[in-house]
Amino acid sequence: MFIEGDEFDDLDTFSAMSAIILGAAETASTGVGEVKKVIVHFQEGRVLVITSAGKRGVLVVLANRDVYDKIESIKEGFRAFI
């Protein structure tokens, strides 16, 4: 796990909960269609974007601004890495 710029008390919990959120969305959408990403908007203006990066990876981006347009290119780079 790589987190740049933020201090987290428990990285394992953050990564596990992010994967669980994505898994819950995928389960809830069974029969509706494939989940592309889960987006959480925080009151402080931050946004958390969770997306699958293949069968072995979950990409989680926590940003101070909208990053929707850049997520696909970030995800492709992440897939190549894993």
Image: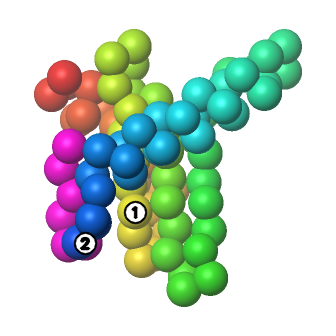
Drawn side of residue 23 relative to residue 33, left or right = left
> How are the colours assigned in the image?
rainbow
- Amino acid tagged 1: Leu
Mark 2 is surrounded, within 10 Å at the Cα level, by few (under 14), some (14 to 19) or many (20 or more) other residues, namely few
Q: Is residue 35 visible?
A: no
Judged by its main secondary structure, the magenta piece is: loop
Q: Nearer the viewer, residue 65 or 9?
A: 9
- Amino acid tagged 2: Asp
Mark 1 is surrounded, within 10 Å at the Cα level, by few (under 14), some (14 to 19) or many (20 or more) other residues, namely some
Q: Quadrant of residue 10 in the image? A: bottom left
Q: Residue at x 67, y 25 (%)?
A: 26
Q: Is residue 60 visible?
A: yes
For the C terminus, the image quarter is top left
Q: Which residues are magenta?
A: 1-6
Image location (x, y in percent) of residue 59 = 37, 40
Label disc, if present, on residue 6 of the rendered structure? 2
Drawn side of residue 31 relative to residue 53, left or right = right
Is residue 11 shown in magenta? no
Q: Residue at x 48, y 44 (%)?
A: 17
Is residue 4 shown in magenta? yes
Marks 2 and 1 close (CB-CB < 8 Å): yes
- Which residue corresponds to mark 1? 62
Q: Nearer the viewer, residue 47 or 6?
A: 6
Q: Residue at x 20, y 43 (%)?
A: 1
Q: Residue at x 39, y 33 (%)?
A: 58
Real-space Cα distance between discs 2 and 1?
9 Å
- When the figure is inspected, residue 32 is found, relative to residue 71, above or below; the finding is above
